[in-house]
Image (cartoon, helix red, strand yellow):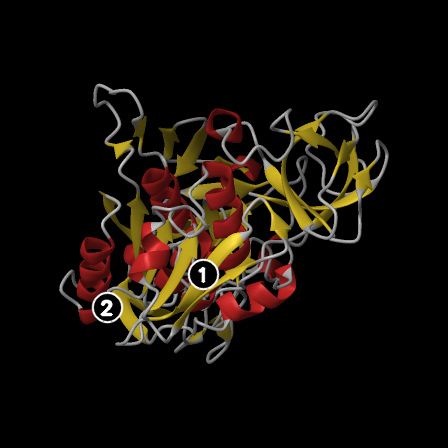
Amino acid sequence: MRGLDEHRAAALALAAPLPPVLVPLLEAVGQVLAQDVTTDGPLPRWDNSAMDGYAVRAADVAAATPDGPVVLRVVGDVAAGSDDAPVVAPGTAVRIMTGAPVPPGADAVVPVELTSPRTGGQDAGDHAWATSGADVEVRAAVTAGQHVRGTGEDAAAGEVVLRAGDLVGPAHVAAAASVGRATLVVHRRPRIAVVSTGDELVAPGTALRRGQIPDSNSWLLAAAVQAAGADALRLGPVGDDPAALRRLLHELDGGDHGTVDGIVTSGGVSAGAFDVVKAALADEPGVELVPVAVQPGKPQGLGRLPSGTPVWTLPGNPVSAFASFEMFVRPAVRRMLGADPERPRVAAVADEGWRTPPGRAQLMPVRRVPAAGSGSGSEPGPAVRVRRATARGSGSHLVARLAVAEGLAVIPADVDEVRAGDTLEVFWT
């Protein structure tokens, strides 16, 4: 029987980062950068105002106080986006808005709240402004550079602002746009086919005859594929017909359904008389069906079809399929994306005890419970307490209870029993 870690390594070895593609900014969200993004100039490109107020020479207002204001003549206006550049000579000021370029001669900005129009006032919201040609009283001193965003303050010319390997999110999109990029080079998003099997499966919403059950696995696994960052092609259910399943798998491998970077099947890999996946793949030299020392999820399979498409065959019980996907398939999908294959793992405290299968690792769906005095129980670390999400054990068939699971506790094969208070290794799903 193959060990858990050995099978994880074999499953991950089937995947490699997909080739880079150039995509528009919004399409890059959720994908992994394949190339650094650098600035082609300083950011910001020019000194600009951090406040609405007046651009001044700091030396002109060094003595300004509330009781002894300094009077300056307003000689122009600069709005955000304007290319006007009125010169600030000694004794003058320019009305300026947030984000507008600081005009020549000015080295600081006085916020409008610290000024009053002496003549030619104009109300604008909560503050009055002195218009061009009028005088303004400045009631506070500023130092050179105050309330000015300096050229290159955010990033110097040629600086790396985003690195290959970054997972693109909203802030990455904003950073790329701020340096003038309308596109990003990312690893192509994989497209994974999901095939559920079994004569007993029918589409959700279908009136059930005796012996039939709704197909939940294809939806579960397709959703898991998408949550991992890939595109899912959901197919099935396919009945217990090995020839039909073999034909579908070869069509997927040959590109008849478009580009497919991997195939995930569920069901039909155990020792039953009608295990269709096992029968369909029996003559595929590149695929191995092996028992793995884990509960749930003992019957597993993986390999490559003739044209090289990776295939992972998972058990049919929903909790087994979910746990198997998390342990064996999700890391491979993440590697295809160019991302870190592993979820972060944390230490958590068992809130209850349970037995574990001798000689097999256990993947126990768990949920968080508040620890006394620790708030919600959502904090990472040993203060987090967990209990079984499926009260009757690992519950490979208890799909309705799977919805309350927040993670999987990984219990090593040499542990026969979990006791309340034991520290467990958990990753949140």
Asked if residue 60 lies left or right of residue 423, the reply is left
Report crowding for label 1: few under 14, some 14 to 19, many 20 or more residues within 10 A (C-alpha): many
In the rendered picture of this protein, how many numbered marks are placed on residues? Answer: 2
Position of 309 compared to 250: left or right? Answer: right
Q: Is residue 109 above or below residue 210?
A: below
- Under mark 1, the amino acid is Gly
Q: Where in the figure is residue 356, as x and y percent of width and height?
A: 73, 41
Residue 114 found in image quarter: top right
Whether residue 235 is visible to the viewer of this picture, yes or no, is: yes
Q: Is residue 246 above or below residue 70?
A: below
Q: Is residue 356 left or right of residue 46?
A: right
User: Element at badge 1?
Assistant: strand
Contact between labelled residues 1 and 2, with CB atoms less than 8 Å apart: no
Which residue is farthest left? 256
Residue 417 appears at what percent x and percent y? 81, 39
Rendering coords of residue 307 (x, y %): 26, 76
Q: Which residue is nearer to you in this view: 237 or 218?
A: 237
> Which residue lies at the image location 25% right of the left edge and 20% below the top edge?
208
Task: From the image, tell me which residue sits under label 1.
Answer: 301
- Comes first in the chain, label 2 or label 1: 2
Q: Which residue is mark 2?
A: 253
The amino acid at mark 2 is Asp
| Residue 152 shows in this picture | no
The one nearer the camera, 336 or 192, is: 192
